[in-house]
Amino acid sequence: MLDLLHELLFNYTLRTVALGAATLGIVGGGLGTYAVLRGQSLLGDAISHAALPGIALAFLLTGSKAPIVLMLGAGAAGVIATLAILGVTETTRVKYDSALALMLAVFFGFGLVLLTYIQRHAGASQAGLDAFLFGQAAALIERDVVTMALLGGTALLVMGLFWKEFKLLAFDRAFGASLGLPMRTLDILLTTLLVIAIVIGLQTVGVVLMSAVIIAPAAAARQWTDRLGVMTGLAATFGAVSGVGGAVASASIPNLPTGPTIVLWMGILVTVSLLGAPNRGLLWQWWRDRRNARRLRRETVLLDLYALALKHDDPTYAHAESVLDAMNAWAGRTHRALAQLEQEGFVARENAQRWRLTDAGARHARTLAEERRLST
Amino acid sequence: MTALQLEIQLVAIVVAVACALPGVFLILRRMAMMSDAISHAILPGIVVGFFITESLGSPLLIVAAGLTGLLTVALVELIERTKLVKEDAAIGIVFPVLFSIGVILIARYAGDVHLDTDAVLLGELAFAPFDRFTAFGLDLGPRALWVMGAALGLNALFLLLFYKELKLATFDAGLAATLGFLPGLLHYALMGLVSLTAVSAFDAVGSILVVALMVGPPATAYLLTDRLNWMIGISAGVGALGAVGGYWLAHALDASIAGAMATATGLIFGAAVLFAPGRGVVARVRLRNRQTWRFAEQMLTIHLLQHENTPQAQRECRVAHLQEHLNWDAPFAEKVVNRGTRRGTVERRGPYLALTDDGRALAQDALERT
C-alpha cells in the first residue's frame, strides 16, 4: 500500500498517467452529470466517435501532432456532428436515435478513411493517431496532462459561472425561457462544454470508451443524492477515483490496458451504487419493502384478532392461531407476526394454541382501525 | 475490373443488404442505438469464442458472440427496469463495460494469436477474398461470402415468415400483445438477428461500421417512402449502392473499404435529406416559394377585384400603389405583377392594372374559400 503511494508520487510515468486519468474523470464526471440528467447520455458516445475525422483532418492540414491541435480538430468535428444530429432530427422525420447512430458511424467511417489514407500516403508519421481509437494512457506526457487540465478546468469554470442557468436548462427549460434567458444559447454552450470534456479524454481512453467516462460516474452519483450540486461533486469524485484506480491497476498488473480498466472501475462503482445506495439502491428498496410487508402483516393480524374479539364483546377474547392463519394465506408467517406482536406487548399467549389481545394491543388496534377507516 | 475486385464488391453488397434488413425494424422501433451497443458488446463473446474454437470463422464463435449480444439487451433491460437509470444511460454503461472486458481479455491472453482489437473494431474487407471456402477440393469462393450469405438468408427468411407479426408489433405493440403475438419474444428474436448479423459482419467491416450499414440505408429509405415493404426494398438497394460506391471511393483514395462504405452511405443519406421528393429540404423550399408567390398573386387579384369599377380605381390599381397598400417593396410587387401577367390573371394598361377573366375567377375562388 505504502509502496503504491510512493510509486504514485514519485514514479513519473504512473504519476502522469494517474493525473491525466483523474483530470478526465473529474471533468467527464462533472459535465456528464448534465448529460445524464438531460437524457443526452448517448450524445456523448456519438460525439466521441465523431471526433475521429476531426483528429485526422487536423493532422492532415497542419502536420502537427500537438495535443491542442488534435483536440481542436476533434472538438470541431464533435460540434459539427452534434449540429448534424440536431439538424436531421429537426428538419426530417428521422428520429433522434437513428440520427445519433447514423452520424456516429458515418463520421467514424469517414475518420477511418482519413486515417488509412494518412497511413498509406504520409508514411509512418501518423504513428500515434490510432492511439485515439482505444486510447493510450501509458503514452501520456506532462504536456498532454497540462493541456487536459487547462481545457477541462476552463470547462468546469464556465459550468460554475453559469450554474443557475444550466440548472434551469436541465430541469425547467420553459421557466428559464419565460425569465428571458437565452435557453438555446445556453444549450449550445453546455453541449460545447460536453464536447470539451469528451475531447480531453480521447487520448487516454479512446473514442469507443469515452462515453462511459461521461455517463457512468454521473449515473452512479445520481443514486446517492437528489441534489444537483452533491451529484456533480460525487460524479467528479467517482470519475477521479476510477481514473486513478485504473492507472494504478494497469501499472501493477502486466498487460492490463488503462482505458478499459478505468471503465471497469466505473462499472463496479455503478453496480455498487445501484445496489447499495441509501434510499434509491436496490438492496435498500428490497429491505424497505420487506419491512413494510412485515409491518403490514403484524397490523393485519392485530386487526383480525381485534375484529374476532369484538364479536365476543370482549376485546381480550382469545383465538386459535390456526384461525388467524386461515384468514390470510401467508403460509406460517402469522406465527412470526404474533411472536413479534408479543414482544411489543400487544398480544399475549393464552395457551399453546390461542392468543389474545392485551389492553395495550386492544387500544393500538382501535387506533389502527380508525386510521384505516379514515384513509380509505 | 478483376475477379478480386468483383469478389470484394460482392461480399460488400451481401454484408450491406444483410445489415439493412433488420436495420429497418431497428429504426422504426427507435432502437437504432441498440445496434451500436450490440456491435461493441459482442467483443468479449468473440474473444471467448475465439479462445474455445481458435478460429474466427467458426459457427460456434458466431453463436457464442451472438449470445453476448442478447446478454447486452437483457442487461440493458434489467438496469432500465430498476428505474434508477434511464434507458440511454443504461445502454451507455453496459456496452463500454462489456467492450472493456473484451479488450482486457485480448490484451492479457491473446498477445500472440491472430486477434487484435483493431481487427474486430475495424475489419478489413480487402482481405476477404484471400480466405477461401473449399469443399471436396473445390474452391467455392470467399468464406465471408458464405458466412454473410447465410446471415442474409436468415434475415430474409425471418422477415418473410414473420412480416405480419413484425409489422404489427412495430406499429402497434399494444394490439400485437392483445392478439397474443408475444411482442417480447419477437423483440428478442430481432435482437438475436441483429447480434448474429453484427458478429458475422465484424470480420469484414468491423463492428462500428455495422452500425452505419444497419442504420444508414433504412434511415434513407424512411425519407423516401411511407410503405414498409418499399422501405425494406429501398434499404437493401441503398445498402448495395453504398457498398459499391464505397468500394470505388476506397479504391480511389487507397483507404479503408469499410470506412468508405460508411462514408458513401452517409452521403446517400445526405442526398436523400436534401433531394427526397416531397420531404427533402429542396422540395420543401420550392413548395414554400411556390406558395409565397401563389399567395401574393391571389392577394393582388383580390385587391384589384375590390377596387374594380370604383371611384378609387384610378388611385388603387397602380403598380406603384401596391407598395403602400399591401406593404410590398417595389421589386417584389414588380415580380408579382410579372407573374400575374405571365399567367394571364392580370393585365398592364399603362401604369394601371386590370384583372382578366381568369384573374377575377382566381380572386373570387380565393374569397369563397375563406
Image (tube, grey):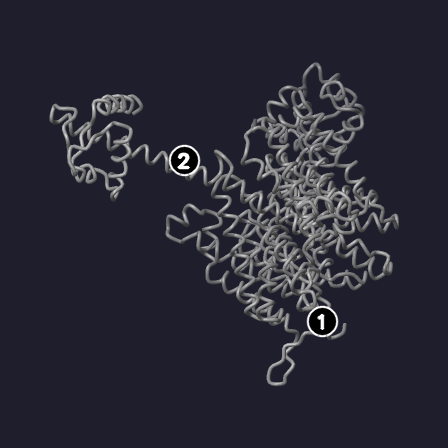
- Callout 1: SS: helix
Compare residues A108 and B108 and report the one nearer the observer: B108
Q: Label 1, on which residue?
A: B6
Rounded to the nearest angstrom, the CA distance separating label 1 from label 2 is 65 Å
Left or right for B295, reference B23: right
Task: Let me know if residue A20 appears in the view.
Answer: no
Residue B11 against residue A114 in the figure, above or below: below
- In the picture, measured across the screen, residue A286 lies left or right of residue B8, that is left
Depicted B149 relative to depicted B181: above or below: below
Let me know if marks 1 and 2 both belong to one chain.
no
Residue labelled with disc 2: A288
Label 1 sits on what residue type? Leu
Q: Residue at x 55, y 57 (%)?
A: B69
Residue at left offset 68%, top offset 74%: B131
**Looking at the picture, how far across and down is residue A132, in whole percent?**
75, 51
Q: Is residue A274 left or right of residue A53?
A: left
Query: Does any portion of residue A269 appear in the rendered image?
Result: yes
Q: Nearer the viewer, residue A272 or B225?
A: A272
Residue B213 in which image quadrant:
bottom right
The image shows residue B312 at horizontal and vertical percentages of 71, 15
- What amino acid is labelled 2 in the image? Arg
Q: Nearer the viewer, residue B198 or A236?
A: A236
| The quarter of the displayed image where residue A36 is located | top right
Is B83 placed above or below B179 here?
above
Task: Relative to B183, say whether B284 is above or below.
Answer: above
